[in-house]
Amino acid sequence: MAADPLLSLLAGALLVAALAPAAAAPSCPHTNLTANFSADFTMLQHQLRGTVRLAAEGKCALELTRFDLLAASPSARFWASDGPTMSDLAAGRAFSPLPLNKTFQNASLELPFARPLPRLLALYDPDTFSDFGHVFLPNGTDPGLDAAAEPAPTMFDNCIPLSEAETYRLRWTLNASAGTVEIGLEAAVGSEYYMAFGWADPKANSPAMIHADVVVAGFTEEGTPFAEDYYISDYTECKLGKEDSPVSGVCPDKVYEGGSNDSILVYGHRQDGVSFVRYARKLDAEDAKYDVPVGATEEMVVLWAIGRLRPPDTMRPHYLPQNHGGPRDTTFGFARLNLSETVDNCLGPLDADNKEDQERIIADRKTPLVVTSAPAVRYPNPPNPDKVLYINKKEAPLLKVERGVPVKFSVQAGHDMALYITSDPIGGNATLRNKTEVIYAGGPDAHGVLATPKELVWLPDRNTPDLVYYQSLYEQKMGWKVQVVDGGLSDMYNNSVVLDDQQVTLFWTLSVDYKSISIAARGEKKSGYLAIGFGSGMVNSFTYVAWVGNDGVGRVKTYWIDGKSATGIHPTSENITFVRCKSENGIITFEFTRPLNPSCTGKVECKNIIDPTTPLKVVWAMGASWSGDDLTDSNMHSVTSSRPIRVLLLRGSAEAEQDLRPVLAVHGFMMFVAWGILLPGGIMAARYLKSLKGDGWFQIHVYLQYSGIAIMFLGVLFAAAELRGFFVSSVHVKFGVLALLLAVLQPLNAKFRPSKPANGEVPSHNRIMWEYLHVITGRSAVIVGIVALFTGMKHLGHRYDSENVEELTWALMLWVLSVIVVVLCLEYKEVKRRIGDRSARGHWVLGNTEEEDSVDLLHPDGAARNSESSATGVMEVSRHGFSGSEEIDLESPCLF
């Protein structure tokens, strides 16, 4: 029994000795982190993913697992910094000499360190001030050093490729205890594409999309991510249904009766040409009618698809997926999935062909690029500065210019921002950073504001590199890239204008003999098709539609559109030649040549005549997809110009179609008062009021005529001032000018009329000819003026498609007919009065002072008229309304 205490002591000593090495195991002296710590990289660029941990066994090293990165520049490094701002990163240092100019695929790395860990570990390129992503490392004062940080939204437990080309991937993390699953959809597609994934109907005998529960994810036109529940009831685009037809097609759950959106958007971004959206959903869906319950450990059939996305419009307020097209396993497919299985078959980052997601602007020689500044929202080169440059209201776009084509900038970004074109990707005067740069244009004087913009002209030449940058001379990282290419459309065409809303650029060149015109159109945003039309709107226009089919072939077709639905689109067979169409990064450009005056008859396209001397009204439209054969309402545009642009083909310029209906209404009213009331009234006064005693008829005649002429001139000046010019081009203007000239001629020939004959004398030949000229000219003026009123109504209807023009035209016709009826009645009474006067007085006797000495030109036989003047003969009245103080013959036709 005495040995027992000894044995116990020996055993205790041995245990202590065994544990002593473990307890005394060395730890890294440069950090308080433990092996339990882990954190994920935040992705900003280059498809960065990975998890950071402290190396085991007390090593002073960081371990990176599942590390993905697209190749960066040779200067990029792991970087130690105190924070993620531009100033923090610029003041940082290289954390590791490991170069990052190669692609890493699920790599495991070890980064040793020999000094205290920084607050931030980034992947950073000091030459371009680019942060590819980073992870925060807590220091000794931070709580929870042993706790794992929140997972980055781009990191998942599992990943499998869906498409055969592995350009579409599914990532997921299952939380079985909470009854949820978080899903990430990732595809190397354009921003105009959707990504769809969901579960097939478990009751179906074979995999099918009908009755499937899917989530459609993508990005709005503003770049905002979305993920929404959809239910497939038919292989068609969603039809919202009416009272007599139910909802059908690929529709959001919430448009079905009793349906709801049960998917929750978690995160989304567009980086490096790759779309990524993360969303969460419950396994046991609450919407039993339109959602499929998912078993956490059950292998189930899933389906997927990618395709173009149709943006909302006034008829369909939802983003709707278009037919995916393409073969199975390329743009759509089926698979079997068990969420509880652990699998990671995604090797490395997705590498898109086109990694430039930023909006782009293609410069041309005519249109200045408006440069302003505003806060950064989606700057393409993180970390974001406080303010960046906007060009044509687009944030730091990729600018594309052509060698040999002058580029005009209208700098309105403020006097503290001087624009310059430089070889330095950062800007802000590279000499301050001991760097060299080449300045191609701009400098300290290239600054201005909205009230006093500064114009900067830059001419890229053959020595200009393929890539330069527009930047601010005083602030770093405010601009972005300029791609310099060989000459294109701007060199090929003599003229170009930007159409309404700055979304489409139109180019054209007239042939030397003015018999044909070559036209090109280029969209400034991504779309499935691009259309331009000649007319005040897409309805009642001759339209040219360009698109690239699924076979990659560009097409241009012509149409006559007379309605707002697919049934109103009628293909035509216009003679267009030298047709080209291409789509570059979703930007459609097409070209064609056509005759100005089609040499055909009997077809609607024969009316599509272009007169280069008159403004050509041009509108545009864009949409998700087009078909050259069977058109449906799904081919209707999703965005269109808000108004037509009047293109002046000979001048090479354009002007917005202004709504001048109020101006033209005032002009028309003035002309109606002049030509429909005052001037005809003056003629009628001279014709039918002479039977009254005194000169009242003459005063009424003169006042009405002068008032009519004055109002007529006011109407002409009013319209000419608002229309910014006086153009004798339309039929209405030609009749108006003729009426104006005839009206002005009347007071002029009244000034030079021959003297009247004395009582009893026969009128001279000149006097008779003058009276004929005066009467015929005046009445012709009224007739031409009335015709001008009718042509003006027709011109207004043609210009604005006004609905009430027809009613106004009928009202004008009734007014003219009423005046004609009144004139006929008065003329009938006048004839009866003259017959009565003749029979009472007998025959006219030469020298009779009671008779008038002027010829009645309205009387059929040209007989002398009876005078109602005083017995002393013809009354002579002096009027100063004419030049001088001449005597006026009250009984001769005056003015009209």
Image (cartoon, rainbow, N blue to C red):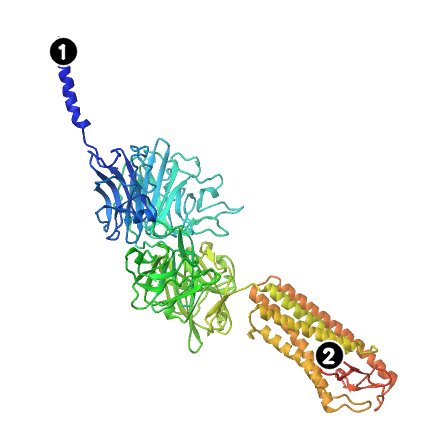
Task: Give the residue at x 13% y 17%.
Answer: 10
Label 1 element class: helix
Quadrant of the drawing holding the N terminus:
top left
Mark 2 vs mark 1: which is more N-terminal? 1
Q: Is residue 404 left or right of residue 783?
A: left
Residue ID for mark 2: 881
* Side (left or right) of 233 relative to 3: right
Quadrant housing residue 292:
top left
x and y percent of residue 310 in the render? 43, 52
Disc 1 residue type? Asp
Q: Few, some or many C-alpha atoms within 10 Å of disc 2 (few <14, some 14-19, many ≥20)?
A: few
Q: Quadrant of residue 809?
A: bottom right
Find disc 1 in the rendering and name its residue: 4
**What residue is at 46 percent from the left and 56 percent from the top?**
639
- Would residue 754 be visible to someone looking at this image? yes
In the rendered view, does 425 fall on the left or right side of 665? left
Distance from Cα at disc 2 to Cα at disc 1? 148 Å
User: Which of 382 and 360 lies nearest the eye of the viewer?
Assistant: 382
10 Å crowding of disc 1: few (<14), some (14-19), many (20+) = few
Q: Give residue 256's position: percent from left, percent from top.
A: 48, 42
Quadrant of residue 718 within the rendered picture: bottom right
Relative height, residue 876 to residue 787 (above, below):
below
Q: Please, what is the three-letter code of the amino acid marked with disc 2?
A: Gly
Instruction: Give coordinates of residue 598: x percent, y percent.
Output: 46, 73
Q: Determine whether, in the image, residue 98 is placed left or right of residue 628.
A: left
Spot occupied by residue 567 in the image (x, y as percentages of width and height): 49, 58
